[in-house]
Image (cartoon, rainbow, N blue to C red):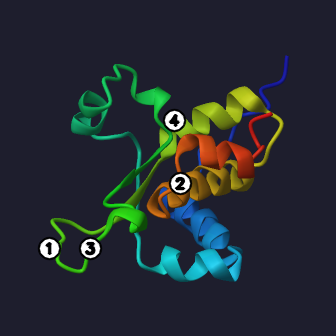
Amino acid sequence: MTRKWAGRHAPSLEEFEALAAAAIAALPPEFAAPARDVALQIVDFPPDEFLAGMEMDDPFDLTGLYSGVPLTEKSLFDQPMEPDTIWLFRRPILEEWIERGNVSLGELITHVYVHELAHHLGWSDADIAVVDRWWE
């Protein structure tokens, strides 16, 4: 029996950031401008307060999250409490990538990023499903 994973390592946070940067660079022009206004955070796991707020127990169940106020709900009179941020969670994304086995890591990171960007744009999950048939 050979160990095909011997000598390999999981992509680092920096490598994830490079893949996310490639996804952002490839966005169509109508999405590139709004994407520049959203911070990107890549961490190993979702913070406990995110999990609690979503009533989730397993940190592997959350691959990404948009935190902020969608563009469709923003007002010039609102004082921002924190920057709009897209969070990518490395370990859950890696776990899903391994389980799927049929997409590249870059494709999965792009999908998660675009899904969260859609929330910034004010799209519901149902709206996203119409545009993004990736899960089928």
Residue at image mark 3: 75
Q: Quick one: label 2 or label 3, which is nearer the N terminus?
A: 3
Q: Quick one: label 4 or label 2, which is nearer the N terminus?
A: 4
**Looking at the image, can residue 50 be seen?**
yes
Residue 39 on image: x %, y %:
38, 70
Residue at image mark 1: 79
User: In 3D space, how far apart are the residues under numbered discs 1 and 2 (Cα atoms)?
Assistant: 22 Å
Q: Residue at x 70, y 56 (%)?
A: 106
Q: Residue at x 50, y 77 (%)?
A: 34
Q: Residue at x 80, y 33 (%)?
A: 136
- The nearer-to-camera label among 3 and 1 is 3
Dots 2, 3 in contact, CB < 8 A: no
Please name the amino acid that badge 2 sits on. Trp
Residue 52 on image: x %, y %:
24, 28
Please name the amino acid that badge 4 sits on. Pro
Residue count near mark 4 (Cα–Cα under 10 Å), binned few <14, some 14–19, many ≥20? many
Residue at image mark 4: 92
Snapshot quadrant of residue 94: top right
Please name the amino acid that badge 3 sits on. Ser
